[in-house]
Amino acid sequence: MADTLATLVAGGKTLQGAQSALTYVPAELVHAARVFYEKRLNLIKEIPDPGFLANVQQKVGFWYSGPRHDDVVWPTLKTRLLQELPEAAVSGVDAASSKVIGLGSPPGKESISTRGLVLGYVQSGKTTNFMSVVAKAADVGYRLIIVLTGTTENLRTQTQDRINDYLIEPCNSIWNPLTSVDMDFSQTTSADAILSNTSMRSIAVVKKNPARLRRLRNWIKTASVTTRQSCPILIIDDEADQASIDVGTRRQSTINALIRDLLANPKAAYIAYTATPFANLLIDPGIEQDLYPRDFIVDLPRPDNYFGAERIFGQLEGESLEDSVDDGLDVVRLIPDLEVDEVRPPTNKTALGSWAPEVPDAMGAAICWFLLATAARRLRSGKISHSSMLIHTSMLAAAHEKTAETVVDYLEDVRASLVNEVPSAFDPFRDLWESETGRVQADMFGNQDIAFDDLMPRLVETARAAKVIVDNYQSSDRLVYHKEKPQTVIVIGGNTLSRGLTLEGLTSSYFVRASSAYDTLLQMGRWFGYRVGYEDLIRIWMSSELKSWFLMLSIVEAEIREEIQVYEAEGKTPAELPVKIRTHPQMSVTSAAKMRSAVKAQVSYSGRRVQTIMFNECDNAWLNSNITATREFFERLIRQGHEENELEAGRRGFRVVSADDILAFLDSYNIHDAAKSIDKDAIRRYIEKERAEGDLKRWDVVLMEPLNGDGELDLGLNEKVRLLRRQKMYIPSDDGTANLKAIASTSDRVADLDVGLDFIRKSLNLKPADKISDRQLLQFRQLRQTERTGLLCVYPIAKKSNPDLDGSGAEPIENRRVPLVAAADVIGLCFMFPESRNPRSVVDYVAAKVDADYLEALDEELDAADKLDEEKAVSDELVKA
């Protein structure tokens, strides 16, 4: 009877209306069934599940009580998933997909216009989640399901293949597939007969391409008005930040308009899936017909065994000044700038025609490592599995072919020397294996350690099996992973590889391409994902510039996820989120990557921390100027009557410093030209704007000395200042820039308060082992302070992080810290802003330009791909006819 109630609710009735409709059933049974139904709703909420941001109506009207005993598609899919995944993982997928279904609209509702977003991680199982949503949507009565799969045919094919395998074939009696592995959507018989059939579920897997979307829209319109008014449609938009958003280009405006046409049907729900939410959250929420997720945002939890940006690029900071910081696994290898210039093709068509690339040293090492890692996987597992290498140097199809020819020649030479057992052929492989396994040990992950001599026979087998494939819109030999035929493949491509496509068994990546959009850049991290059994064998070759971008973007992404969680905890709605994301100060960093010309944007420092992490290491005058500015700042405060021990905390510093003094110090302090996230002019205007509202008039200033250290620097105080020791990231630059990654620690948010972290944990009801986030410290600080006071922390850093080294003998190691050897001591700053009382407290800034020659003009290639697909659509229709 509870299932009957659930069916009536899915049909559009309220729970009370469903109960009233059951007049033929004993009242006691209906009452008991309602109690049982409501308990099931609560059960869904009690399972450890993802957080979600939803408008009030969605939260109050949560209608889906979970799978019913008469469901068909989800129970079948669940059985299959239990054969492949741990039970706990399947429970998580079950809970998350039920949450997504419940936050949408009941299919029986008179009209449906849902807009939702599911935020996952790159290569983390989003497809499994949305297939579960599709299964449950089919069970509750959604009659037409459209899965949009990015812009490339191989991704569409890969998604179609999985949907066939997991959903359609096991329940083929209820599915009417409108597309196939070989055929995207093309005109078929009238939609009326298909969409009016209440017992069938139609499904189309369609790429975001004008020709296909136009055909799909027109086909639906052939159904009668009555049929369309009674047909619930669910659109799943995979890789939703790609092509769906109208960013002003002709092609994307067309695709966005066609998706909105599909959603103009009377009963249409839209759920976006993405791992990089920047573009989706920057859609104007005021345009009701557009795709902003106004109804809900579901944030999927990160799986424990997932290899993401933090695992590879490390944490930003420790909890306190004395804590060491995890800089990630030592798996990134830097490609020298000269080699980057060699492998990156010219953008000029004429020059591209005569371009003749070679396999330089780093690319050769990446290829050899791929053979070694694949051989090691075979030896460990005792079987042959899919193994892939990614070479990604350009989006241009012509460049892929030329690069592939060179790689094929290189691979054939390596293969011949190994197969013929040329004595010297194994030496570079031995050196590479011993060097790399020394830097990332197998036992860190509980994996088998392998000696090179044991590896040699498998290395020859692997070299024989390896092949090179070009995968782009022009290529005929596309990347396909057959279950029965394990692939050992080096894949060369561009757009088709940078979006959604899973590269099975990816071990080695060679990556130099520049992207015009920051979200696209993160999506290109095909190395993110699950690497069980070969975690120690992953290697990534990239330029130092790209490494810096990835590090910054991973920080931005993490902070946006945290913002979503905070809004959820505060009971806010998706409609309140976009201002916060749009004005994130780090967006000024990413804007330089996504925009070809200077543009005006807005930034807010509400609740933010901005710190100086980049310094001109070799510029004595530049560094000494900051020391002088800091000394004069402190001396000026003392002349005004301040004392250096005004703080209750055990640190030296000053309380109730005027905003004028803070701004004067900021004016005299040098900030590195590349430090786009800390804009002096924007900070000044933000402080002045807040001061006009009565806030940020007063500041605390804290000198962040170490507990132990030599007094070495005179900053105008009673005693010399003890100096911190910081090492820099190994990111080679020819301009003498030292990047410290972070100088502040999480606990510095309360450096001026006389409280310990243990006391704060108790105040926030946290366990002793729980990490405290900056957001929690901000919350604690604002509970103790009635006034919105700013905090400026000053970090005196010794010019040599290792006094015993002069820098000349230090051997640099990629992805690791190296000694700081500066011309003078370094003064770092961190501005910590309270939460603004004005939610729209923003100031303008101008985003930096990016050299247009550095980015690839892809419009012609995309138009050519669309033209090819239009021709195929016509051909498909002729075949069907």
Image (spheres, rainbow, N blue to C red):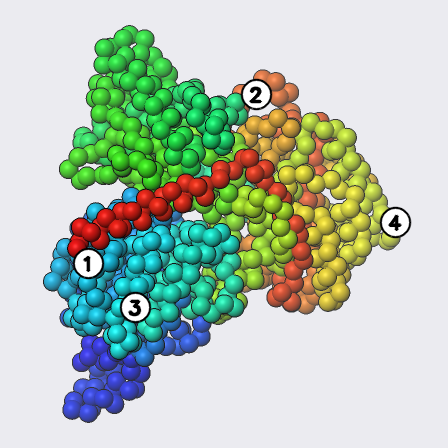
Q: Quadrant of the C terminus?
A: bottom left
Residue position marked by numbered label 3 in the rendering:
221
Q: Position of residue 236 (x, y in %)?
A: 33, 59
- SS state under label 1: strand
**Disc on res. 300:** none
Q: Nearer the viewer, mark 2 or mark 1?
A: 1
Distance, label 3 to label 4, CA atoms, is 78 Å
Q: Amino acid at mark 1?
A: Pro
Q: Position of residue 95 (x, y in %)?
A: 30, 62
Residue position marked by numbered label 1 in the rendering:
177
Give the mark nearer the N terminus: 3 vs 4. 3
Residue position marked by numbered label 2 in the rendering:
810
- SS state under label 4: helix
Q: Amino acid at mark 3?
A: Lys
Whether residue 760 is visible, yes or no, is no
| Residue at (29, 47) in percent of width and height | 871
Q: Position of residue 187 (x, y in %)?
A: 24, 58
Q: Quadrant of the N terminus?
A: bottom left
Give the mark nearer the N terminus: 3 vs 2. 3
Q: Check disc 3: other Cα within 10 Å, few if <14, some if 14-19, many if 20+.
A: some
Whether residue 853 is visible, yes or no, is yes
Q: Nearer the viewer, mark 3 or mark 4?
A: 3
Give the mark nearer the N terminus: 2 vs 4. 4
Q: Position of residue 134 (x, y in %)?
A: 26, 61
Mark 2 and 4 residues: CB-CB less than 8 Å, in contact? no
Say how many tags the image has. Answer: 4
Mark 2 and 1 residues: CB-CB less than 8 Å, in contact? no
Question: Which sits in the foreground, 677 or 448?
Answer: 677
Question: Which sits in the foreground, 641 or 628?
Answer: 628
| Residue at (34, 18) in percent of width and height | 410
Q: Check disc 1: other Cα within 10 Å, few if <14, some if 14-19, many if 20+.
A: some
